[in-house]
Amino acid sequence: MNAPYPFVERRWTSPDGLSLFARDYAPGPGVARPPVIAIHGLTRNSADFEAIAPLLAQSGRRVLAVDVRGRARSDRAPDPMTYMPDVYAKDVLALMEQSGIDRAIFLGTSMGGLITMALAAMKPKAVVAAILNDIGPEVAPEGLARIAAYSGQPVEIGSWADAAAYAKRINAVAFPHYSEADWDAFARRVFRQQPDGEIGLDYDPDIAVPIRAAGAKALVPNLWPMFRRLARKRPTLLVRGANSDLLSADIAGRMKKAAPSMAYVEVPGIGHAPMLDEPEARAAIFEFLSEVD
């Protein structure tokens, strides 16, 4: 078996002084190409990209997979109202500045795609191209309500078997084909074992505070102007899980009409959101990136 592709543990400082973390995968040999910055979803972290990031790095692109503030190895914010896409976007711009990166390709899963749209609005020249993974400028309310229902809620976990069972209960709708081994691996990405042996979700439960404060009407954001600016001015790929309850087929169809040049792939048998290790997603991403410099 090949050894895992190595990454450097990189830290940077947010504009408000938090210490934030990213996995930094060095590019393989070849002509230098724009790097990829990968941004995860609401309750997840940089481990979500542990399958696709090494492949992208081996193809010749540096990859920075971030832990957004409040997740995994990044600091938790003293003020939970900073758990907002515009703040996350400013954090990523700080990473670029401190890493000497002027331009990058953004790979955003779910919330990471919203952050990508915000970044393109704040600093358009920083975004060379965008891959939006199962997210759009509008989201289906039933999917967002499902995510909001468990985000930040306490959960009692006594063992890794309990953690895997929780992961399956929350996400089986998206990955109906997963085996017990898959759920164990999934759990080890989203839970962390503390030195005292306790196992807990690897994010600050206060990430849900802004969602609760906004109320039901704000659960469905309208980011169509941001999306149009993003997708009409630069190469964009939309990846959709065929069974997604967050990015409906209707919303995806309207996105394609709004941005006719946008590339598109649908991943069969998968809900929200593809892990990007699926053959269809992987092939579409590499085809898309082959034309981006």
Image (cartoon, rainbow, N blue to C red):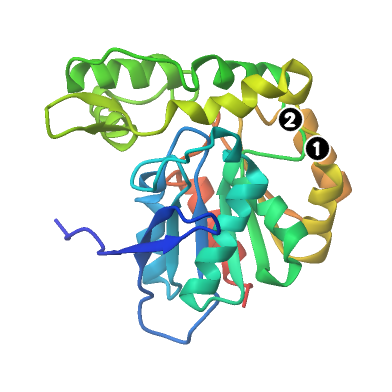
Q: Nearer the viewer, residue 29 or 34?
A: 34
Q: Are marks 2 and 1 in contact (CB under 8 Å)?
A: yes
Q: Which residue is mark 2?
A: 249
Would residue 175 be found to the left or right of residue 107 on screen? left
x 45%, y 43%: residue: 278
Amino acid type at mark 2: Ala
Quadrant the C terminus occupies: bottom right
Query: Considering the numbered disc 1 on the image, is that residue within a helix, a strand or a loop?
Result: helix
Q: Nearer the viewer, residue 112 or 202?
A: 202
Q: What is the quadrant of the N terminus in the image?
A: bottom left
Is residue 244 visible in this depiction of the protein? no
Residue at image location 42% in from the left, 63% down from the top: 12
Figure check: 133 above or below 186: below
Q: Position of residue 117 (x, y in %)?
A: 71, 51
Q: Amino acid at mark 1?
A: Gly
- Residue located beneath label 1 in the image: 253
Residue drawn at (55%, 73%), measured in percent from left and top? 97
Q: Secondary structure at mark 2?
A: helix
- Outermost bottom residue: 31
